[in-house]
Image: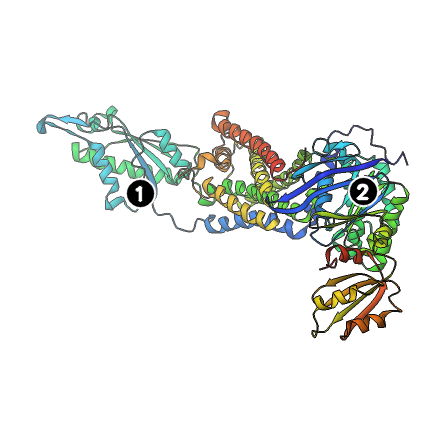
Amino acid sequence: MEKRKRISNKSRIGSRFLALTKSNLKSLFRDKLGLGGLFAYPIVAILIVFFAYGFDMTYQSAYTVTIINNDIEGVPIPEISSNANASLIFYDTLKSEEYRDTLIIEGYNIHTFEEAKVLLNFEGIDAIIVIDVNFSESIYDLAGHEEEKPKVNITTINDLVVEGVVGSTVAKVVNSITMNASGIPQSTIVASKVDAYAFTIFELLAPGIIIGAIVVCLGHLTVGFGMDKEIGTLQRLFTTPAPTHTILLSDMLSQFITAMVQFTMMITLSLILGAYFHPNVNWLALIIIAMLFNLSSMGIGMILGSFVKNGGAGAALSFLVTFTIQMIGNVYTPPTEPMPGSAFVPTSYAVHAFRSIMLSGNSTWGAIGGDIIFLLIFGLSTIAIGIICFHQKFAITK
Amino acid sequence: MEYIIETHDLKRYFNGKIKAVDGINLQVPKGSLFGFLGPNGAGKSTTISMLSTILPPTSGDATIHGYDLHKESKKIKKLIGVCPQELVLWDNLTARENIHLIAQMHKMARSDYKERTDELLGQMNLLERSNDLVRKFSGGMKRRVNVLMAVIHEPEIIFFDEPSAGLDPQSRRVVWDFIKDFQRKKKTIILTTHNMEEADDLSDTLVIIDHGKIIATGKPNDLKGNLGNGDIIEFKINGEVTREELMPRIKKLDFVESVVPIGKKRIALHAMDGLRRISEIMDTVQVKMLDISIRKNTLEDVFINLTGRRLRD
């Protein structure tokens, strides 16, 4: 009899935690219906976005450009006692009926090249036209001098056709202006390509959809706690010597693992569907962000789980919260139009970091460090609050 | 006598006003099988929830094996096993995995709990189905697994909350034999039930509880004996005469010890040598007596005598 009551003398640090996690995972993966729902939702979501926005369905007859005009002053013309600004003529000509089918001008409020480059990446802008500061001067004062040809810099996406069409159109317009001014058509068009990529809406939304999939596990954790309370399994565990935090964290870990499996599936599916991954994408950084965001989601799920009394209430409450933080967290909105209040939800930080890593290939500390810090602090603090809430709400004796 | 559980004025109110348990004082002798008998909602399960540390009392004190319920729940949890009234199982685990999980929570050595699980499953006739998922089990099989999970770690104190609820007579007998086996091992068992046969058959000491209060305590035979050694005669009357008119007349009979109204039209009386003297009762009543039954008194009669209600009312 004494032998039976023996407590294992092996090192048992975390043995309860591992046993519970193993049981939770077994339960989870044997529940075919629940598992189907868990994995189906994000897959369906990404497929819907893919079929809605993944194809370029319209023939592109015009390229979208933005103009940065450095020739603000123009040049003084003594005959009329005023300044003449050839850049405005250039601007008006490009906007005229004649070129409407070739170029569409966007981004009037853009003043710097860096700002314009963001548009080049994310807003479907095909080219940036930079008018030189001496543009008017070279047309009106020094016309005829070969070395002072009016200068326009063009930066296009990495596409020869775009470079050719935009470059030749701009040259034609500048030549028409110099022809009127001096009788000699001349221009200098400096064209360069940047490693920019014209994203489809699907490609822009894909990082958010992947993040959105991870959030779904928040709901599963909440519903799981609700059902555990409803069935009584949580109460049954609370009658054993297993510490409360061990029980709760093991539930959390099993959902965490499930979310990471989901994440892997979503990344794979995104690759198959042709979502954009920058050549310099840092996979490790992507995984770290996914894990940190997962931690934040689990923390929210833990807090919600402490309040709900059954699975139904858990489903309703978690749907509301998941939907809200997806919407506020820029999951379904382009990066240049952040939702109000997005600074307060972890989703927006994760989406920001994902877009930076996936679309720009930028995983430097400067780019995603803030996101990492926010997600880490948010995740750890919400998990701690969740455990405290369970102690308070579940009325466990000390 | 050594008491393993002692409570003093233990109370649990819900929402500040519903008195689920209203000042219970208990002294449970070590190694006894202590029964709680009472109707649904009497406060039996709430008492067990408090003693098993998952529900804090509103007020009052309790010690279990000398440990304070409020301050030393971790130590108490190592000593107890709880079989809840509901079927609390992980449906997507096998019977064996369910039992192992509880053993692992008590940090039993792997080889020990494996051996003991086989032994227990054999005792409950579940060995052949031990590797099947519990969700495929019948209600009776689930109930038996529910019981095994409470005892895998051989606790000193076992709480059985309605352990045979919903079981067929054969399965119920298996569970009762199983509980009696622990009784023989001198484990302390707390059993709640609203089944008078179960309470009578298993309990060493019985507490009758109603509306959150203890209304009688004693050995089952003593409680029944307090009613007397006669027969219980129960009958229904038609509407011609009211019970209020009849009951004083019956009470005047010298062989009648007590008369209790039950429900709307029934009367139960406790009478010495009732079977032989039923004609005298009929002469006294002088109205048509319907559905007459004569039997030896039971714990239900004790409850009726104390509350005027049946256990299932």
The residue sitting at 75% across, 52% down in the picture is: B38
**Label 2 crowd (10 A; few <14 / some 14-19 / many >=20):** many
Going by the numbered disc 2, the residue's amino acid type is Ile
Is residue B126 visible in the rendered image? The answer is no
Residue position marked by numbered label 2 in the rendering: B158
Query: What is the quadrant of residue B151 in the picture?
Result: top right
Farthest-out residue, top: A147
Query: What is the quadrant of residue B308 in the picture?
Result: bottom right
Give the side of residue A14 with respect to residue B279, left or right: left
Q: Is residue A321 above or below residue A142?
A: below
Camera-side mark, 2 or 1: 2
For the N terminus of chain B, the image quarter is: top right
Q: Nearer the viewer, residue A141 or A123?
A: A123
Which element type, helix, strand or loop, lies under badge 1? strand
Q: Position of residue A281 (x, y in %)?
A: 53, 33
The reply to whether discs 2 and 1 touch (Cβ–Cβ < 8 Å) is no
Give the side of residue A151 with respect to residue A57, left or right: left
Q: Nearer the viewer, residue B262 or B136?
A: B262
Q: Position of residue A371 (x, y in %)?
A: 50, 30
Q: Nearer the viewer, residue B69 or A334?
A: B69
Is residue B144 visible in the rendered image? The answer is yes
Q: Measure how far apart labels 2 and 1 are at the Cα level.
A: 81 Å
Going by the numbered disc 1, the residue's amino acid type is Ile
The residue sitting at 33% across, 38% down in the picture is: A65
Disc tally is: 2
Whether discs 2 and 1 lie on one chain: the answer is: no
Q: Chain of mark 2?
A: B
Identify the mark at residue A104; answer none if there is no mark. Answer: 1
Q: Position of residue B195 (x, y in %)?
A: 79, 56
